[in-house]
Amino acid sequence: MNITNTDSGEYNRVLLNSSGGSGTVFSVTVNVFFIVDTDRGSVSVMEGDSVTLLTGIQTNQPEMIKWYFNGFQIAVITGDLSYTCTDVQCKDADERFRDRLKLDHQTVSLTIMNITNTDSGLYQLEINSRRGSISTFSTRIFIVVVSGVSAAERDEIKRKSVKEGESVTLDPDVVKNLNDLKMWYFNEILIAEITGDQSKICTDVRCEERFRDRLELDHQTGSLTITNTRTTDSGDYKLNITSGRFSIKRSFSVSVTADRTGIYAAVSAVLMFLVASAGLIYFCKCHSRRKYIKTQQSHQSNAVEDSSSNQSVEANTPHESSSNQTESEAASETLT
């Protein structure tokens, strides 16, 4: 119990019987790996991340493999896969890890999904195997500490909202290790990769078409910057960090909203144009109406004047006829 790395070595078992003694050799190996969040820690595990404890083992022979968390059995697998269990399926496990554990049958690596601060503690892997008369027992210990980051801080790190055309930076906020393998994905498409001091951006055709010349990587922090964002850049981005005996997956959500300023300006310009056009049309109609009214009034005035002149002429014509008749009658009487 309470095994440590100083307990590594060979152990002999001797059985005595009437015909003599027989012995069995046991080989015990204890390895310790740390995943801690301290000033000198190699990684920061945040609530919501998925963490894989890597064993580096390929199971090619029958073995009994068991995973423990703080002394409680949480996963079991036999080399021939005749029996497996995880979380609540195992006899002494509790509800803590329900539906959040994944066991790789080939490498026996254990993945803790959507990790919470109650998952902090000691994880122990025990491997039992037998080759002939030699039984081998090895154990590997992982210490996981989940950083106590508030929900507001997590949202600030993992959820980004920007306006179209602005830049957005996704910072993994982990302790830097230049030997880590960092891989960025967008909608399951690999868009960027950092290995040591080497980096690759958009080796996929689909990535090149979407993010052409708009992605920037920081080798020191592993952060990804998207410049001149578009609404089509909205979605889930995932970072996979692999280093030594652990792998961390962290998700980011990016929301890019359309720049309403330009839209409002365009709408305002259109409205102003429509108002000006309506005003001009109204002015032209009013001007035409006034001109028409003046023309009609002018025509009516001319008609009245013509009518008055005609009436005056008609009034003078009978008077002249009467005078002429009187003069004719007077002349006739004189001749008589």
Image (cartoon, grey):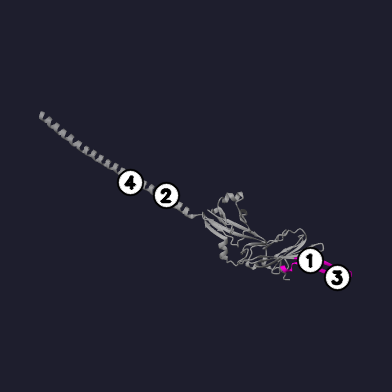
In the rendering, at what x and y percent does residue 174 appear? Answer: 60, 62
Describe residue 175's horizontal placement relative to residue 291 as left or right: right
Q: Which is nearer the N-term, disc 1 or disc 2?
A: 1
| Between marks 4 and 3 in the image, the one whose residue lies nearer the viewer | 3
> Dot 2 lies on which element?
helix
Res. 26 mark: 1
Magenta segment: 5-28
| Between marks 2 and 4 in the image, the one whose residue lies nearer the viewer | 2
Residue wearing tag 2: 273
Residue wearing tag 4: 290
Which quarter of the image is occupied by the C terminus?
A: top left
Q: Give 267 or 169, whichever is nearer the viewer.
A: 169
Distance from label 4 to label 3 (Cα)? 131 Å
Q: Which is nearer the N-term, disc 2 or disc 4?
A: 2
Res. 16 mark: 3
Q: Which is nearer the N-term, disc 3 or disc 1?
A: 3
Name the amino acid, label 2: Phe
Name of the residue lying farthest toward the right: 19
